[in-house]
Image (cartoon, rainbow, N blue to C red):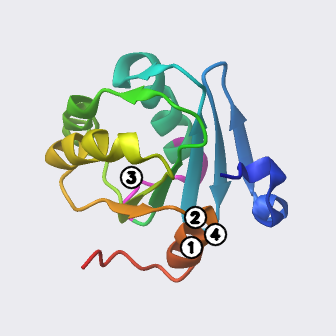
Amino acid sequence: MINIKDSVVYDSVIKEFNYSFANVYVFKGYVVSEVNEGLAFNWDEHAELIVKDVMSYLETDGSDLIYISNRVNSYSVMAQDWVKFFKKSYSLKGYYIVTDRKTSILGFMVENLFFKSKIKKFDCLYLAINWAEKGFVDVA
């Protein structure tokens, strides 16, 4: 798997947020996150800060954004924290997960239980970005 900094799309980043726990890259119409290895990613310590920073920078509620979780590292996600995201009146146009790990299938299925729409899974970052650039959200 490739991270954004090592990819050909890095030149298209319009804003980069670097945290001690993750890097987040803002593009036109989509955002890509890369969370650090071994983290237990949750709303209160991580996601809320990212969401506030990105939404404030873009002046949006997220309904026009596709969020790509580029899972180049192995970490856990508190799937139930999506409820907190939606309670704050945030939304997303689409949510894509990029991973080549077979072990993340269970986590993907659990996360899908808490996310209001369907999650699209990719095994290639470039395919996910291609979909995001075209504004595709259909997961059928």
> Mark 4 packing: few (<14 Cα in 10 Å), some, or many (20+)?
some
Q: Secondary structure at mark 4?
A: helix
Whether residue 21 is in magenta: the answer is: no
Residue type, label 4: Tyr
For the residues labelled 2 and 1, the Cα–Cα distance comes to: 5 Å
Q: Secondary structure at mark 3?
A: loop
Q: Residue 22: percent from the left, percent from the top?
A: 62, 30
Mark 3 vs 2: CB contact within 8 A: no
For the residues labelled 4 and 3, the Cα–Cα distance comes to: 25 Å
> Mark 3 packing: few (<14 Cα in 10 Å), some, or many (20+)?
some
Residue picked out by circle 2: 124
Is 139 left or right of 62, judged from the image as shown? left
For the residues labelled 3 and 2, the Cα–Cα distance comes to: 27 Å
Residue type, label 3: Asp
Q: Nearer the viewer, mark 4 or mark 3?
A: 4
Residue picked out by circle 3: 61
Mark 1 vs 3: CB contact within 8 A: no
Which range of residues does the magenta coloring cover?
56-63
For the residues labelled 4 and 1, the Cα–Cα distance comes to: 4 Å
Is 8 left or right of 93, judged from the image as shown? right
Give the mark nearer the N terminus: 3 vs 2.
3
For the residues labelled 1 and 3, the Cα–Cα distance comes to: 25 Å
Residue picked out by circle 4: 126
Q: Residue 101: percent from the left, percent from the top?
A: 47, 46
Give the mark nearer the N terminus: 1 vs 3.
3
Residue picked out by circle 1: 127
Q: Secondary structure at mark 1?
A: helix
Q: Nearer the viewer, mark 1 or mark 3?
A: 1
Residue at (44% x, 30% y) in the render: 47
